[in-house]
Amino acid sequence: MRFFSWAFFLLGATAFSLSAGTFTVEGEKNDLVIKYDNEIMVRAIELNMPAAPDKFDYKVLPDGSRVWNAWNENPEYKFRREVALRPDNTVEINLACYVPVFNENRVRTMSFKMPYSFFAGGKYRALHTNSRSWNYQEGDFAADSKNFPKQPWRFMTLEKGEKKIIFDMNALGAADFCHMYTGGAVRGVWQVMRKGDDLEIFSGATVPVAHDYTGLKMVLREGVFEDYDKLHAQRAFTYTNSFKPLALYSFGDNRVGGMYTPNNLRSYSVRNRAGWVGFPELKTYTASKEGAYYSHMAGKDAVFRRSNLASGFYIVTVGAGNGSGTANNFSLSVNGEDLEKNISVKKDTVHVASKTFHVGKDGVLDIKFDGDFIVSAIGIQFLMADAEDYTLYRGFWKVDGFEPGSIYRNIDYAKKPVFKLASDTFVLPVSGKEAAGPLKKIQSQVLLPDPDSPELAWLPTGNWFKMLSNSSTLSEADTPEKADRLIKSKIAGKNYDAVMVSGMHSRHTYINHVQRGIEAFRVMAESAHKHNLKLIDHHDATLCWNVDAGLRFMAENLPEAVRNCDTLLPSYQLCPSDPDFCERYYKYLTELVKAGVDGFQIDELVYEMNTCSCQHCREKFYEATGCYYPVNELDKDVQNAYSELRRQWFQWRKASIADWFVELRRRCMPYNKNLVLCMYTTHWGFTRSNPRYSANSCLFELGRAVNYFGTEVMSRNPLMTYRNLLPHRRMKNVLTLTYGTPIWAWIYASRHPQIYAGWAISNMAKQVALLPEIVIKPNEADFLKFDTSKENMPRTGVEAHTKVALLFSQASRDWNTNISFSAELFGLAQSLDAEHISYEFICDNQLNSKDLAKYNVIFLAGNNCIADESAAVIKEFIRNGGTAVITPYTGINDEMGRARKEWIFKEIFDFTPQFRNVSVKSMANNALAEIFKMPVMPAEHNAEVLASGTLANGSTTPLALAKSFGKGKVIYLGGVFGSMLCEGEGSHRHASRSKAFDPAIDSFYRQLIVKAAANGRVWSTNAPEKVITALWRNKDKIYVHFFNATGVEVKAGEMLDPLAPRGEKYPALTADISFTLKAVKNGKVTAYSPDFEGGKVLESTYRNGELTVTLPKALLKTYTLIHVEQ
C-alpha cells in the first residue's frame, strides 16, 4: 500500500477511459441488485431509517433512463431513495431525508452490500478525507485482507482486469464545501469496510439537533482514476481560493508573468490543442516592455480555438489593453453564443469581458472575433463538469417526485440559467508611474448608535446562545410552533439576552430560498422577542462555494464576482465594491431588519487574498488615494508589501470594508437605529500583520460602524493556556477604550473545569463569555448563575485599576520590521501578570495627552511604528513625570513602516540604536542556557546603567539604561527580552512553547520590569505566580479577581491536550494570600465565588492610605472575586 499527499496525472484524451462492461439493475421496489457484466456488484442497498419505504415508483424516461424510487411521507421521518440506470452506462443513487429537530431517532444511513469476491485481487486508487485537499492513496483488495484503511473516502476506483469502475462518492464536486457535514448537506464522504464475505460502502449521519436535512449521492460508472479531471472541475477547494485558470494565454511580444502561456501567432492543431484557426493576419503592438496588458495582437475576423476540454461549463475571459492606441471595433462570440458585442477599447484603457459557456462532448471551445479586434489575453476557467451538474441543466433527482427536504429539490433548479456578461473597462496607467501623483488622505466616517440607548443596555452584560448551524436549512424553525419550541428548549433555566441564529450560511447561493429565509427569520424574531431576546443573524455575504447552487449563482451573477489582481479573471467571491452586489445585498439586509432581526454577524465581507482588481475597485482606489493599482502583473511595487503603493492599497482596502458597514448602518437606520453589528476574529486574526497576509478586515477600522466585537478562543483548553489567554483578552479591550464597544469571547472547550476557566478569564477582562452548552452538576461550581448575579462585577461603569499602560499599536502590528511585534508585547504582558503588576493595553488612538494622563508608566515594547504626532505626545508624557520603557526598535519607523531618518528618542539618549548583534552569555551574573542575540549597546552614553551582562568574548555590556527627561525618565532595554518569554496560544497541533523558558532571562527580565513599573504600582500581593489577578474599579468599589492556575504545567514542545491537566485541575493552595492596595480608602472587604455560597467578609488593616487584606487559602478554590468598598 502506498500513500501520497498529492499526485498529478497527465490526461491525453477527451473521452473517458473505456472498458467493455455494462451496468444493469434488477429487482423492484426496495429490493434492487446492481450487476456489472452480469456479475453481482451490489447485492443490496440498505437504508437505516425509522421505518421502511412504503411508496414505490418505476419509470422509463424518454432518454432511456430507468429509474426506481422508494419513499416514505411520514412527517416524522420523510425520506426518498432513488436509483437511476442512465443510458451513458452510469448508475446514480440518491437519498434525501427530513429529520425534525425534536425527533429522537436521528440516525440516517445508506449502505451498499457488495460481494468481496467482486473486488478481490484488484487494486484501488482513491482520494480520502475531504475535498479541501488532494489526498491520494492506492492499495490492493487482497483476498485475505480482513479490513480496509479507515478513511472517509470521496473518490475511488477499482481496477481488476477488464473491470475499471469509478465510485464517485462526492458527486457534487470538490466545491461543495459542506460535503462532510452531518446535517444540512449532501454528504460526499463514505466509509469502506470489509465485513466477512462483503465489502460494505456506507455513509450517512446521526443528524445533529440543529439540522433537519441530510442527503447522499453516489455515482457508479466505468473509468479509471485519471478520469477524475474530466468528471470534476476542481481537485480540491477552499473558499478563499483564487479560481485558477485551466488555461491563460497572452498575445504580444513583451515579458509576461509566469501564469501566462504566450500564444501569439500559434495556429491551432489537434496536437497543440490551442491556437488560431487557420493563419489570420495578425500584428503586434507593445506599449511597455512587460505586463500582458501592455501588449496586444491586432487583426480582423479570426477564431481562437481550444480543444480537448471535458464537457461542462467554462468561464471565458477575453481581455485587451490598448496602450498603443490601435484602432479597433469588434464583437466576440463563443461556440456561436454572444460574449460581447460592439467593443471599442480606447487608448490607454483595458477592457475585460467574461461570461460562462457550455462546452459539449466534442470538447471544443471556439472564440470568434468579428471585426477589427485587439487581444492581450484569453483565460479559460473550468467552472463545473457536466458529470457534477445537479443545479444548472438538471436537478438533484433524476426524476421529479416527492421532496422530503426543503433544500436540494428539483424545483429549485427548474428555471433555465441565464449567464450574464461581466464587462470591465479601466485605465491602463503608465507602467511604473501608478503612484507618481500627489497622494490623497483617505477619508473616513464614524456612524455608531448611542451606546447609552436603552435598546443597547443589554450589550455589555448580555448572555447569548447559539441556535441552528451554518448549514441548517432554516426550515427547522420556520413556523411559530417550531421556533417557540426550539427557543424554549434553549432558555429553560438560563438567563439569556440574545440568540445568534445561523442557517443557509451563504444565503445567495441557496438560489430559490432567499425569500423563504426572510420569512423564517420573521417567525424566529417574533418568537425571540416574545421571550425578551434579541435576535442576531449570522451568515456569509460573498462566498461562491458550491453549497446548494453557488457555482450557478456565480455564473448567473458574474458581474458581481471579484477579479484576481494578477490575472484579471473572476474568482469565487463577490466584490464589496460592486454596485450591483451592494444594492442587492443592502436590500436583503434591510428586509431582514424590517422582519425583526436586531443585528448581524456578517462573515467574509472582505476582499480575499489577491483580489479585487475589478473596474469598481480600481476606480474607488484612485478616487481615495490618487494612485492607480498596477495592471502589470510583474510590477515590483505590487510584489513588495512595503512599497508605497502597496501601503496605500492596504489602507484603502481596510477603509473600504469599514465604509461598507457604515453604509449598511445608514441604510438600516430608518428601520432600527440601534442595530447591532457584530464582528469577531481569532486572537491571531487580531494580532497578525494584515498587510503581510493581505487581510483587510481590521477591527480598528470596523469600529467606525460595528458596535459589538468578539473573539473565537481557539485553543480548546482555556485552563492550560491561561498565561496566553488573559493578556489576549485584555488586549481586545483597546476597542472598548476607542469606541466604547463591549467585547465578548466565544469559548471553545469541553468539560466543566475548562469551560469554567474560559468564563473566569473572560470575566477578569470585563467580557462576556459565550460558552458551549453545559449542564452544571450539583457538586460543580455554578459560574453561569454567578455571572448574572449581583455578586459579580458589573461590566459597565468600571475601568482598569492601574497606572501602567502597554501600547498595542495597530500601526506596529501591521508594519513592524526586524522583530516579532506580538512576541515581544505578549512576553512582556505575561511577565507583568506573573509579577501581579496591574496594567492596561492601549492603542494608537489613546496616544493623546488626555488619555495618557491616566498613567504613570507606559511600556512601548517592540512598537516599531510611531507617528510624529504620537511621538510628541509620548515625550510630553515623559516631561510631565511619566516613565516610558523602550527597546532599540521602538519608534524606528513612522506609522506606515517607513524607516525614520532620525530615531525619535535620539534627543534624549544622544545615540541611535545600531542593529549589529552581539552575543550575551550571562545576565546579572546568571549564565544563560544558550546565547542571547541583541543589538550592540552604545560604547558611549550619558545614562544610568540599570543592569549589565557578559558577552561571549568575556566583556561586560549594559543591558538596560535609564535617562531622565524633564520630570520623568526613559528606560532603555537593550534587547527584546520579552519575546523569549512569550507563550503562544497552543492547540492540539501546535505547542504553546517550542522550548523551555530560560530561567536566567525570566528572572532578569522580571526584576527589570518590576523596577520599570515601580512608579505605576497600585498594589502588591504574595499570590503565587500561577494565581493570576486582575483589578478594576468604579466610584464605589475596587474589584480584585483571583484565578487558581497552579495545576497547570506546560512542557516545551508538548501539544495541547483539550482535557489537561489530567490530574487535579485546581489544586488547593498551600498558604493564605495577602495583598495591599495603595492610595485607597478604608472599606468593607467581601469575597464572592461560584465555589461557595454568599459573601465572606475578609480581615483587613488600613494604614497611611494602604489597605492590606488576607484571603484565606480555603476561599480560593478556582476563582474568587473580592469587592473592596470605597
Image (tube, grey):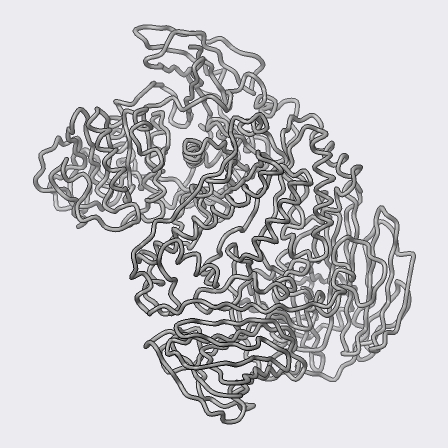
Query: Where is residue 396, by image quadrant?
Result: bottom right
Query: Where is residue 536, by image quadrant?
Result: top right
Vertical relation: 1054 (above or below) 167: above
Q: Residue at x 40, y 11 (%)?
A: 1109
- On the question of residue 199 being in view, the answer is yes
| Position of the N terminus by quadrant | bottom right
- On the question of residue 179 being in view, the answer is no
Residue 1092 x/y as whole percent: 56, 16
| Position of the C terminus by quadrant | top left
Vertical relation: 379 (above or below) 718: below
Residue 158 x/y as whole percent: 68, 73
Q: In the orientation shown, which residue stands out farthest toward the bottom?
A: 279
Query: Where is residue 495, by image quadrant?
Result: top right
Viewer-closest of 50 and 340: 340
939 vs 673, left or right, is left
Vertical relation: 1102 (above or below) 524: above
Count how many numbered circles sit on residues in the image: 0
Viewer-closest of 731 and 907: 907
556 vs 56, left or right, is left
Residue 958 x/y as whole percent: 15, 37
Residue 417 x/y as whole percent: 69, 67
